[in-house]
Image (tube, rainbow, N blue to C red):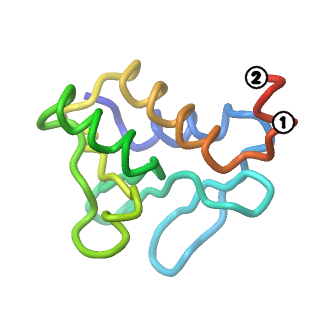
Amino acid sequence: MITQSQYRALALALPEAVESSHFDVAAFRVRNKIFATLREADGRAMVKLTPDQQRLFTETMPGVVSPVPGGWGLKGSTLLDLAAASEDDARHLLEIAWRNVAPKKLAAGR
């Protein structure tokens, strides 16, 4: 299990990551592009994966990740169950999501 505060700290530890609000969720961005969110009211977390990455992780991490319902899920938005995820799981998924949206030069330096 990972707490909301641990998830937030992992997201903000990534290069140039900042937190801002996006509707009713905390959004984690790199150079103004969202790579993850956290809905504090119910503890739902989201990471922005590619559809292929999403398929891989839903198969290899059942019960930990699942597609966001609807169109966003088809594009790779993936729910992360904080109660089922380890800190290592969350760190790994956040790093992948960050790389997916970070500028190539910035991601190359990581």
Judge by depth and name the residue closer to the eye, 42 or 53.
Answer: 53
Q: How many marks?
A: 2
- Secondary element under disc 2, as helix, strand or loop, is loop
Q: Is residue 97 left or right of residue 51?
A: right
| Residue 70 falls in image quadrant | bottom left
Q: Position of residue 6 (x, y in %)?
A: 46, 33
**Left or right, 9 with reference to 56:** right
Give the residue at the far left of this rendering.
Answer: 63
* Image quadrant where one finds the N terminus: top left
Rendered-image quadrant of the C terminus: top right
Q: Are marks 1 and 2 in contact (CB under 8 Å)?
A: yes
Residue 90: name its quadrant: top left
Vertical relation: 78 (above or below) 39: above
Q: Which mark is residue 9?
A: none
Q: Which residue position is annotated with label 2?
A: 110
Q: Is residue 30 above or below residue 64?
A: below
Residue 20: percent from left, percent from top: 66, 65
User: Residue at position x 39%, y 56% from top?
Assistant: 76
Residue 64 is situated, as x and y percent measured from the top left of the image, at 20, 36
- The residue to which callout 1 is attached is 106
Dot 2, crowdedness within 10 Å: few (<14), some or many (≥20)?
Answer: few
Please give the name of the residue rendered at 37% of the width and 70% of the height, measured from the top-left corner.
Answer: 72
Farthest right residue in view: 105
